[in-house]
Each structure stands twice: as C-alpha cells, then as structure tokens.
Amino acid sequence: MTELGALALVAMACGACFGINRALLGRVGRRLGAPGASVVNHIGGALFLLPLVALLPAGAPQLFAAALRAPWYAFLGGAIGALFVMITSWVIPRIGVMKTTVLFVSGQMVTSTLIDLVQDRLQSPPRAAAGVALIVAGVVLGEVFKQRARREAD
C-alpha cells in the first residue's frame, strides 16, 4: 500500500470516529444541553489523553512545559473546538447526524479553500471553487429532494 493510501485509510477511520462522536454528542446534548455536552466531551478527551501523554518518551512534564511556551493564538484551537462541540450538540438533535456532518464538511471545505487561497496554496483556484460549489450544491439538492418527498408523502 502506498503512503497516500495508508493516510487515506487513517483519515477515513478518523471520519468514522467523527461520525460516532457526533452521534454521541447529540444524545448527550439532548440530556445535558450543549454546554454540558461540551464539558463531558472535553473531560472524556482529557481522561483519554493523560495516560497517553504519561507514556510518551519525552514525558508529561516536558510536554506540558512546551505547551505553555506556545503562542497565545495556539490556544484558540481549543476554544474553537469547545465551541464546535457545543454547536454540534445543539444542532444534531434538531436535524440529525448525517445532515449536520454534511453541512459542517461544507463549511470546512469553503473555509479551507479560502485559507489555502489566501496562503497561495491552491494549484487551481477555479477547480477548487468548482469542487466547493459541487459540495454545497449536493447539500442543497439533498434538502430540496427531501422536502419534495415529504410534501408528496403528505
């Protein structure tokens, strides 16, 4: 297997974890609300990571010291992640895991494309724009067809 193939499999497994995580967050969000689900998610993440960090060859103290030397904006990722989990926990009970995930991926694609465009990393901006347009069109068409099917069923 090529390196790209192996990385693709790992990324797909990560996507599967993402889907499972979203479904669990939706259930917890229904019971505890979005902020409670975010807290539970991050406590669970910390409990999972702490033993792994302790087993690292560099050791936990060095890792935490290095983390404290990170620039302030590096910690924005954690804040954005907590906000993301809260939003997920609020949206999923209302529209479902699949639609939420597709909409999130659409938002990620648009944002990622814009970031790559600003950083001059797109080999073909028109092709990237077309790809994003196809993803968004797929989301819109899926919703249009679903609404049409509901009207016909009634």
Image (cartoon, helix red, strand yellow):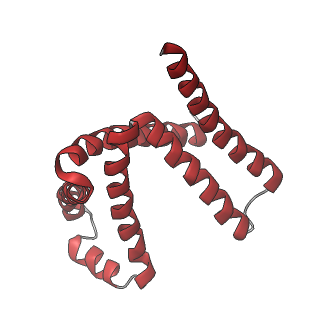
Q: Please tell me in which quadrant of the rendered image residue 50 appears.
A: bottom left
29 over 77 or under it: above or below: above
Q: Does residue 10 appear in this view?
A: no
Image coords of residue 87 (percent x, y) = 37, 55
| Number of marks present in the image shown | 0
Q: Which residue corresponds to the image point at 62% horizontal and 37% vertical from the top-left?
A: 140
Q: Is residue 107 visible?
A: yes
Q: Residue at x 50, y 48 (%)?
A: 104
Looking at the picture, tell me which residue is in the foreground, 85 or 52.
85
Q: Residue 69: horizontal and vertical position, in percent?
A: 36, 85
Q: Residue furthest toward the front? A: 154
What's the residue at 58%, 23% (across, down)?
Answer: 148
Please, is residue 33 above or below residue 65 in the view?
above
Report whether 61 appears left or right of 134.
left
Q: Tell me the residue at 65%/40% (across/down).
A: 135
Quarter occupied by residue 14: top left
Query: Which quarter of the figure is the N terminus placed in?
Result: top right
Viewer-proximal residue among 152 and 52 = 152
Place residue 142 in its image quadrant.
top right
Residue 64 in the image: x percent, y percent? 26, 76
Picture coordinates of residue 24, whole percent (x, y):
26, 41
> 49 or 15: which is nearer to us?
15
**Residue at the top extreme, as displayed:** 153
- In the visual, does 15 lie left or right of 53? right
